[in-house]
Image (spheres, grey):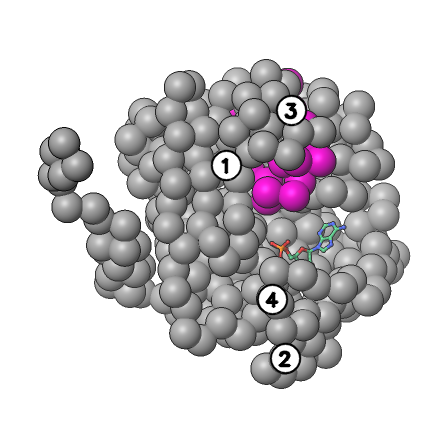
Amino acid sequence: MSILVVGSVAYDGIETPFGKVDRILGGSATFISLTSSYFHQPLKLVGVVGNDFADGDLNRFKDKNIDLEGLQIDNSGKTFFWQGKYHFDLNNRDTLDTQLNVFEHFNPVIPESYQDSRIVCLGNIAPALQSKVLDQVQKPDLVILDTMNFWIEGARNDLAEALKRSDVLIINDSEARELSNEPNLVKAADAIRAMGPDVLIIKKGEHGALLFTDGNIFSAPAYPIIDIFDPTGAGDTFLGGFAGWLARSGDYSNDNFRRAVVYGSAMASFCVEKFGPERLFDLTAKEISERYAEFRSLSAIPVQIDELI
Ligand code: AMP
């Protein structure tokens, strides 16, 4: 069973109330693949970088045994660059600069050795490109889609097509409301699941995440992080942990989707402790298991059914 990850590979400039970095490895596919690699291999990456992409950064992927056959190196220009600034409310960020560079004409080509991947992670790129990826793979077990308000507003029809072909959608609460045109998240979830994905995850920033499956709602707790430093990539890291756990276990039951949401949350809680993906380079299985256990104990409710009766 292999995981296919498609998305942006980028350089980011990030400013938070706690520090600033001019240029650091980033991009949705970067966070997803680094995170998933802790759970399951092979991990197959599809993306594009430009002529400025450092060998040292390529090694970041190679060190985690990530297959780079599908990573195009386009020497005609520079790597996608994104710059963002966070204020004290770390749930909101301003995008200061987006330079698409070689990403502008990105045409995802899925190598033959990737085409039988069992889990396909479609990171946040144009929905038409996400569909193009699905055109090139054999029937996977699970298609997991990420998107953002930019595409909900600007490419709704393309997004509708990609949604029809997806099994899991991961978005944040404001995007869920915008996509469904419905302020109540439970009603929004029904409306979105009717668009295609059987499983919907609504992330609520530092307030946890909701998982909607058939007739079932699960609320994952938020981790009270003491050392939140930089939220960049937390959403993608969540996706990586979620997909990684499902690939590792090969179990797509409701209970296991709950576990996957908690693994996603646990990995995202590591990601925000340092700038960019720095924290994702040297985690240990022990640290991940311990954080997972902390999440479980955070919301363990002692069973006593007749308290008020
Ligand atoms: P997240 O914080 O999970 O939303 O993801 C942050 C990452 O998304 C950064 O590393 C950026 O390089 C990348 N990113 C920002 N804007 C875009 C975009 N329009 N398309 C693809 N990736 C982007």
Q: How crowded is mark 4: few (under 14 residues within 10 Å), some or many (20 or more)?
A: some
Q: Position of residue 225 (x, y in %)?
A: 41, 68
Q: In this view, does 273 lie above or below 262?
A: below
As shown in the figure, which amino acid type bears the numbered disc 2?
Pro
Q: Where is residue 214 in the image (x, y as percent from the top left)?
A: 42, 19
**In the displayed structure image, the side of residue 13 where residue 212 appears, left or right:** left
**In the displayed structure image, the side of residue 298 where residue 107 appears, left or right:** right
Give the number of the disc on residue 17: 2
Label located before the other in sequence (1 or 4): 4
**Residue drawn at 78 percent across, 62 percent down:** 95
Q: Is residue 191 above or below residue 236?
A: above
As shown in the figure, which amino acid type bears the numbered disc 3?
Leu
Write the start and end of the magenta stretch as one range.
Answer: 163-180
Q: In this view, does 303 lie above or below 252?
A: below
Q: Disc 2 to disc 4, how far (Cα)?
A: 9 Å
As shown in the figure, which amino acid type bears the numbered disc 1?
Ile
SS type, badge 4? loop
Label located before the other in sequence (2 or 4): 2
Label located before the other in sequence (2 or 3): 2
Label located before the other in sequence (3 or 4): 4
Q: Name the residue under label 1.
A: 201
For residue 307, which quarter of the picture?
Answer: top left
